């Protein structure tokens, strides 16, 4: 069994797009795959199909209903905020230990590849003093980092790479997902990141979808 944590440099970067793409690749190849989105904010039950958990379930070929969503995403909040803020709005809190234990149990039970999609960026707060980085460090599983091609991504991405290395997390690959309306080209962004990212493999995902199946196949081989 292979477990991978999929994180990003920020929110709305494309974690779910990448996770769903990898799920479809593994299924098309006849490989066993499972996915989790343990924490979700901005969740509206009336729009479950278009939610992050809903998209992952659809990619897995599973029904999008309350029971299935609960099984892969136990911590769901209505407000489109960081998890700590969204939980506070509902007079709730994320129990960090229970979150980590939930993931560990799923890792132990899963066969094939397990993709655990985080929330927001690497340093997004989960509670009063823990972040997504602490979550990844507690699980100690390899990481796939997703970033964009927007102006400013170089600093955000290199900062994320630095903190992942400082916590001794194994970074499998960096995926640069083209940002709509970006003023910087995807190729220039990737070329610059390659100069600074050392030996980290980098994959670029263009917006037009050309060659996505092949690209997801290449990303999957890195995992």
Image: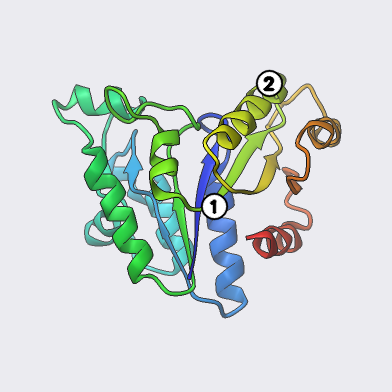
The residue singled out by tag 1 in the image is 142
- Cβ atoms under marks 2 and 1 closer than 8 Å: no
User: Element type at marker 1?
Assistant: loop
The residue singled out by tag 2 in the image is 155
Mark yes or no: residue 6 visible.
yes
Q: How is the image coloured?
A: rainbow
For image coordinates 69% across by 57% down, the residue present is 219
Measured as percent of width and height from the top left, residue 213 is found at 71, 62
Measured as percent of width and height from the top left, residue 53 is found at 38, 51
The vertical placement of 156 against 5, above or below, is above
Measured as percent of width and height from the top left, residue 168 is found at 55, 41
For image coordinates 21% across by 23% down, the residue present is 88
- As measured in the structure, the alpha-carbon distance from the residue carrying label 2 to the one carrying label 1 is 22 Å
> Counting residues from the N terminus, which is met first, the one under dot 2 or under dot 1?
1
* Residue that lies at the very extreme toward the bottom in this rendered image: 30
User: Element type at marker 2?
Assistant: helix
């Amino acid at each position: 069994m292979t477990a991978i944590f999929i994180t990003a440099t920020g929110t709305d970067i494309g974690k779910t797009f990448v996770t769903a793409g990898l799920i479809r690749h593994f299924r098309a190849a006849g490989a066993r795959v499972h996915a989790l989105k343990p924490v979700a904010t901005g969740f509206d039950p009336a729009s479950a199909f278009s939610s992050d958990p809903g998209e992952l379930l659809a990619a897995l070929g599973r029904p999008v209903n309350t029971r299935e969503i609960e099984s892969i995403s136990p911590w769901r909040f209505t407000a489109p905020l960081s998890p700590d803020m969204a939980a506070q709005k509902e007079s709730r809190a994320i129990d960090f230990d229970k979150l980590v234990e939930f993931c560990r149990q799923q890792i132990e039970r899963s066969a094939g590849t397990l993709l655990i999609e985080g929330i927001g960026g690497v340093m997004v707060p989960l509670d009063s003093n823990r972040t997504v980085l602490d979550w990844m460090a507690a699980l100690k599983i390899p990481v796939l980092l997703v970033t964009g091609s927007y102006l400013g991504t170089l600093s955000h991405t290199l900062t994320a790479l630095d903190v992942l290395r400082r916590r001794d997390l194994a970074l499998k690959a960096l995926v640069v997902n083209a940002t709509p309306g970006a003023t910087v080209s995807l190729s220039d962004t990737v070329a610059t990141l390659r100069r600074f990212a050392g030996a980290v493999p980098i994959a670029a995902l263009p917006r037009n979808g050309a060659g996505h199946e092949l690209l997801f196949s290449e990303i999957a081989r890195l995992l």
